[in-house]
Image (tube, helix red, strand yellow):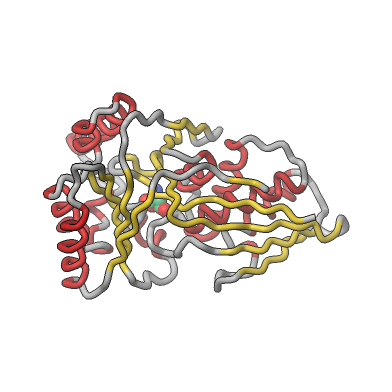
Amino acid sequence: RSVKATAFSSSANLGAGYDVLSMSHLAFSDTVYAELINEKERRVMMESNSNVPLDPARNSAGAPVEALLKEFQLNYTIKLNVIKGVPHGLGLGSSGASAVAAVAAVNELLNLHLTLEDIVKFAVIGEQAVSGSPHPDNVAASAFGGIVAVTSHDPIRVVRIPINLNFRLMLVIPRVNTGEGKTKKARELVPKQIEVSKMVENTRFLSSFILGLVKGDRALVREGLNDAVVERSREPMYPHYPKLKEIALRYDAIGACVSGAGPTVLILYDDSTKLGEIKQEGGKVCAQHGFQCDFITTEIGEGVRVE
Ligand code: HSE
C-alpha cells in the first residue's frame, strides 16, 4: 500500500512575526508517497524527482520519519518518494512542505492517529536537519493551511488566524541560485539583542497585522505588514527588496514583506492595486540587481492533503 500526501508552499514571518507567523499558498506543492516495505528493519529509503540529498538524516522528509519510527518503536522499512514542486532556497517553505507531506503520509500509512500539531512537532525535525534550526512557522502553515500563529513551541500549539479581508497574493521570485545553507546564513544575520524601542515597534506591527486580518481592516494590515528587526538585518541577502516594497505600496498593494528568509517577496493585493505597474517597475528593479524575477499570482493555500 502506498499513501500520497500533498503540502503547499508557505511564506513565513509576514513582517514582524519571525518564527511565529506563516501563510500557506496554492502556488507550489510537494507530494510524498509513503510505502511500507517490511516490518523487520527500522529504515527509511528515499527517492526523489529532484536532487535533494537521499540520506534520510540530511533530508527534511526523511529525518522526521526516522524520528517517528524511533518514537513509536517501529522496526519498519518505509520508502518515501518525494516529488518536489516547491522551488528550493527561495523562501517558499520548500523543506517544510516536504517534511509535512512525509509525516502526514506516514501517519496515514501506519495509522498513528497524529493530530496536526503532532505532525508539526515531527516536521520541525526536518527543518532542523536541513537548516540547523527547528523553526516551526513554515511547517505549521503547510500542515494547517491559511495564516497561522505558532503560539507555543514546547508543546507545539498552532492557531489559525481568522481572515476577514479579501486579498490575493503575488510572489516575486528571483531567478537565482542561493546555494546550500541559505536559511542558516540568514538566521546568523539576525541580531541576538535588540533595543526595547525596536521591540515596541515590532509589537505594534504584529498587533496591527493580526487585528487587521481579524477585523477586515485593510489599513491596519498595511501598517502591520512591516518589520524593524529581522528583514533589515538580512537586507544584504535581498538587496532588491526595499525598492520593490516601495513600488508595491506606491501602486496600492495592501502590503509587502520578505517571504521567510527570502529572497522571494510576498505582496498582498486587491482590486485597487495596480498589478501591471508593479510587475513592470518591479521587473526593472530585479534587472538592476542582475537577475530576472517571476511574478506569480496565487491565493492562500489549504492544509496538508492525504489520499
Ligand atoms: N522564520 C524562518 C526564518 C523561516 O526567517 O529564518 C525560514 O524558512
| Residue shown at 63% from the left, 53% from the top | 102
| Residue shown at 58% from the left, 70% from the top | 53
Q: Answer left or right for 208 relative to 136.
A: left
Tell me the quarter of the picture where residue 155 sits.
top right
Q: Nearer the viewer, residue 25 or 153?
A: 25
Instruction: Point out residue 219 in the picture as x, y percentages from the top left corner.
Output: 19, 32
Q: Is residue 111 above or below residue 219?
A: below
Instruction: Point out residue 71 in the picture as x, y percentages from the top left corner.
Output: 72, 45
| Residue shown at 39% from the left, 46% from the top | 299
Quadrant of image for the N terminus: bottom right
| Residue shown at 73% from the left, 62% from the top | 79
Q: Nearer the viewer, residue 164 or 47?
A: 164
Q: Is residue 236 visible?
A: yes
Q: Is residue 190 visible?
A: no
Of all residues, the one furthest to the right in this rendering is 40
Instruction: Point out residue 85 in the picture as x, y percentages from the top left corner.
Output: 51, 62
Instruction: Point out residue 41 in the picture as x, y percentages from the top left corner.
Output: 84, 59
Q: Nearer the viewer, residue 264 or 187?
A: 264
Q: Answer left or right for 107 relative to 127.
A: right
Q: How many marks?
A: 0
Q: Is residue 225 above or below residue 2?
A: above
Of all residues, the one furthest to the left in this rendering is 250
Of all residues, the one furthest to the top in this rendering is 215
